[in-house]
Structure formats: C-alpha cells, structure tokens
Image (cartoon, grey):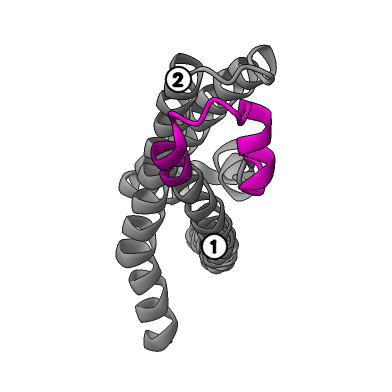
Amino acid sequence: MKDNGHHITYIFREIVIVVIGVLISISIYNYKEKLDNEQYIKKTLLAIENEIKLGQSEVDTVLNRHLALLDYIGDNIDNEEETLYEIIADQGGIQFPDVKNIGLRFFIANKAELVDFDVISMLSEIETNKNMLTSKFDKLLEFSYENMYDNDVETKTKFAVYLSNVVDSEQTLLKLYADYIDKHGEKLKKKEEDR
C-alpha cells in the first residue's frame, strides 16, 4: 500500500512537471507572438504614414495646379478665342495625384484585428475619399475629351464645375491625411520614444 501511495505521488509530480513545462512553453510562445505582432504593427503603421506623407505631397502639388487652372478659367471665361484644350494645355494640364493605399490594403487583409478601430476607420475614410476623387476625375476627363475643341462660356463653366468637384476631393483628402498624421503619427513617435 505504501508503494502504491509513493507511485501515485511520483505520477502526480511528473504530471505537474509536464503541465508546468507546457504552460511555460505557451507563455514563451505568447510573449514572442506579442512581440512579433507589435513589430508588425509598428512597421505597417510606419509604412502607411510614409505612404500618406508621399500622397500628401503629391495631392498638394496637383491641387495647386488645379487651383491655378480654375483661377485662369475664371479670369478668361469670356475669351472665346481659346478652346478648352488650349486652356488646359497652356496651364500645364490636369493631373490625377499618384496616391497609394497599399499599406492599408495589406494591413486589412492580414492583421487588422491588432489595430485600434480608430486607425482602421481613418484609413478607410481616406480610401473612400480616394475612390471618390477617382470617380470625379474620370468625369472631368470624360467631359474634357468630349468638349476639347469647344470655346464657349457654357463649356468652360461646366469644366470649371467638374474641376471644382475634383479640387474639393483633393482638399478633403489633404485634410484627412493631415488629421491622420496629427493623430496617429504622434502616437507612433511616442511609442517609439517610450521604448
């Protein structure tokens, strides 16, 4: 009977050792996974911030060109000697800003659950506005191609309206970029400084 009690104690100790070993392994794995996730989030958010800063610069450049074109049209709308094509060409053309949201798409496709909802929400709003800008720009191009050689006030006015819609989306996109950088760029810097 005494041997039987000793044997049960031995088995119980072995089970406890195995359970403790498994718990330690799980804890180490979870800790490593947490560190990996933090690194992933940090790198992804940094890549997104860099994309946003590049997009911000691009949109700002294009916006200034479009604002100058709007001013020129406003000043010369009654000049029926210039066709819409000549106005656009003389002012450097119209351009779609080269903005990317690759980081956002990659992020959402992989580990979106690791990020604050606020970050995802702001990035989604940026993506939505970019898509709206694309749609407005396509309408502007379509109108421009259809009326390229017209020189009447009505055509120039309609072109200015389409261009104003594009400018509005560009300005909104710039504001969204600035809001994101102000809010989340500072958080990223603070986290970096805390480490």
Frontmost residue, 25 versus 71: 71
Amino acid at pointer 1: Ser
Extreme residue toward the top, this view: 146
Tell me the residue at 59%/66% (across/down). 43
The reply to whether residue 131 is in sight is: yes
Secondary structure at badge 2 equals helix
- Please tell me the numbered disc located at residue 189: none
| Among numbered discs 1 and 2, the one appearing first in the sequence | 1
Q: How far from the left and from the top, in percent, is residue 25?
A: 59, 64
The reply to whether residue 21 is in sight is: no
- Please tell me the numbered disc located at residue 153: 2
Q: How far apart are the alpha carbons under marks 1 and 2?
A: 33 Å
The residues colored magenta run: 70-94
Residue 32 in which image quadrant = bottom right
Q: Which residue is mark 1?
A: 57
Tell me the residue at 54%/69% (across/down). 35
Amino acid at pointer 2: Val
Q: Would residue 102 be found to the left or right of residue 118 on screen?
A: right
Q: How far from the left and from the top, in percent, is residue 153?
A: 45, 20
Residue 7 in which image quadrant = bottom right
Frontmost residue, 105 versus 156: 156
The C terminus sits in image quarter: bottom left
Q: Residues within 10 Å of mark 2 (few under 14, many from 20)?
A: some
Residue 106 in which image quadrant = top right
Tell me the residue at 41%/72% (across/down). 188
**Of discs 1 and 2, which sits in the foreground?**
2
Frontmost residue, 155 versus 37: 155
CB atoms of marks 1 and 2 within 8 Å: no
